[in-house]
Image: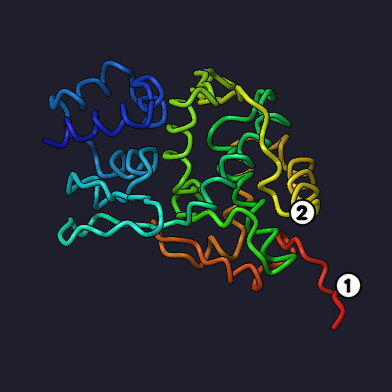
Amino acid sequence: MIADFIRTLRKKRDLTQEYIAGRLGLTRQTYGQVEHGDRELTIGEAKILADVLDISLQDLLDERESQVVVEVEGKEKPSHEPESVMRISVPQKNLAKFREVLLYILCKVGGKPNIGETVLYKLLYFIDFDYYEKYEEQLIGATYIKNKHGPTPVEYKMIVDDMIEAGQLVRVPSRYFGHDQKKYLPVRDPDLTVLENAREIAHIDSVLARLSDYNAMELSNLSHQDVPWIIAENLKPIDYEAVFYRTADTSARHYDDDRD
């Protein structure tokens, strides 16, 4: 039943009925009728709801959620699984580096009121893709999926859940300009020995200085101007190599200064 499907997705994304009702231009009571199966959505409302829940309209109507499974490299893939499952294998060293970079970001700017989960997604994206454009090497090397709100690092949830369970992070629900926000506070300092050189730390600091005061909408809009995001297929991984086709709006490399 689509009403149950919608309610399940809303709860998984930690969204309130009031928030979704506001996005749809409905009262909370009217939206509640949708989740109880007493009111059908119009096509226009269904399109907005699919965007809010970050799935395609077709997946919403089919009551199907595409699933991304992240696993440590070397694990055997199951012989049979649904077509909607996209399995991504990542090296253990990438996960370790992701963990420490996330802690470093939170120690530096996590206390700012605008730094919620969506902002963290975009900061990680620009740290990774700007570094690749500038030095033709990976920093974290995370995998980013294209969605309607910008790039999303697929390893993020697994890493954050593990860190919370290990007592390295604390999730703090909050609100920012009337919207629900997921904030994370570090419990320990980052281990910077996993970063390979001072250039990596300097690069992270540079991106944070440039972008960490942006709110979620501003960073999402900026990511939507970035060629790697533009040319990627929806809900598919974003290709690092596409950074070399960036326009001046998002390019991080000063090509006039390059030397043979």
Residue 69: x and y in percent read 33, 50
Classify mark 2: residues with Cα within 10 Å, few (<14), some (14-19) or many (20+): few
Quadrant where the N terminus sits is top left
Please report the residue visible at 32 percent of the width from the left and 56 percent of the height from the top: 75
Answer with left or right where residue 216 lies relative to residue 51: right
**Residue 184 is drawn in which quadrant?**
top right
Number of the label disc, if any, that sits on residue 197: 2
Residue placed most toward the observer, 27 or 147: 147
As drawn, 86 above or below 173? below
Number of the label disc, if any, that sits on residue 257: 1
Please tell me whether mark 2 sits on a helix, a strand or a loop. loop
Type of amino acid under label 2: Asn
Quadrant where the C terminus sits is bottom right
Q: Is residue 105 visible?
A: no
Type of amino acid under label 1: Asp
Residue 16: x and y in percent read 37, 21
Classify mark 1: residues with Cα within 10 Å, few (<14), some (14-19) or many (20+): few
Please report the residue visible at 39 percent of the width from the left and 56 percent of the height from the top: 235
**Residue 162 is drawn in which quadrant?**
top left
